[in-house]
Amino acid sequence: MPLTERFSWQKTIEAAATSARFVVKVCCGLLVFFLVCGCDLTGKSSLMQPSLTREERLKFALDSFYKSQCKKQWAVLWPLAREGDGEALSELAFELELGLKMPASDSDMKGDWHDANVIVIAINGASKHPDGKRNLNYVFDPARWNKGDVTVVSIRSGSISYSSIKPPPPASMTKLKDCLSQANSPAAGDRCVAQAIELGLVPSFSEYSKAMDAVLATYRPESCTPRPW
């Protein structure tokens, strides 16, 4: 083969390889974008596909939290949490305690409302996974319960609402905390959650998850409001 023709073929092959690498990069970039940035936060579309494993979602959520990327955080954790994944619920509650912002439909996310949601997520997480035990001191902080009224989440017409209740008796709170601390099976955890519901501290998680889905369905970055302190 003449030298000039061999050079021509070599250039053609190099150009084709360069184009292929470019296409691969673009496709990978689009895949990440649609999986993480353009997903349905309720978990009913792209994030429910098996493209990200459970472990990858939890790791990505941790990375997102430290980068203050609230939208990505909820997008990755909530699809697991809404299905009752105890580790995801516990991680979500823990990060909410540390300053992860609640998704909200307006700018009026009060501190008491934030804490009321943390209590729901933390109690359900502690009932299902050992990691959830780390959130119990936050939930059962005496300063929260040794006062007048306490704000709790209530579900009204399928939407998240808030009510004020009198704090349960200290003995009842101690009994609930001990129950969650010692829960070591799904059945034991369910009994603890039933206690919390009976005390009026949390709604049923199935109702709560549906109501949170409705919030996240209209969630936008600007709706992720900071806590007021």
Image (cartoon, rainbow, N blue to C red):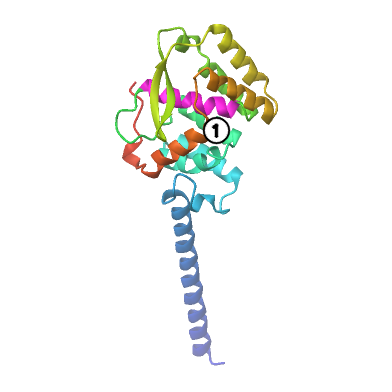
Note whether residue 98 is visible: no
Quarter of the image for residue 133 reads: top right
Q: Is residue 69 above or below residue 108?
A: below
Which residue of the protein is positioned furthest toward the right in this rendering? 185
Q: Is residue 110 left or right of residue 84?
A: left
Q: Is residue 2 above or below residue 200?
A: below
Relative to residue 46, is residue 54 drawn left or right? Answer: right
Q: Which residues are magenta?
A: 111-126
Q: Residue furthest left?
A: 107
Q: Position of residue 68 (x, y in %)?
A: 42, 36
Residue farthest front in this picture: 157
Q: Secondary structure at mark 1?
A: helix
How many labels, in total?
Answer: 1
> Looking at the image, can residue 19 be seen?
yes
Taking depth in this image into account, of 37 and 219 the one nearest to the observer is 219
Looking at the rendered image, the quarter that the N terminus falls into is bottom right
Based on the picture, tell me whether residue 125 belongs to the magenta stretch. Answer: yes
The residue located at (37%, 41%) in the rendering is 219
Please report the residue visible at 56 percent of the width from the left and 54 percent of the height from the top. 51
For the point 49% across and 34% down, which residue is it? 207
| Residue 90 locus on image (x, y percent) | 56, 30
Q: What residue sits 29% from the left and 31% below the top?
A: 107
Task: Return the residue nearer the eye: 215 or 49.
Answer: 215
In this rendering, would 42 be left or right of 222? right
Q: Percent position (x, y) of residue 203?
A: 49, 27
Report the residue marked by disc 1.
89
Q: Is residue 220 above or below residue 109?
A: below
Residue 22 included in the magenta stretch of the image: no
Task: Tell me residue 194's x, y (percent).
Answer: 59, 23
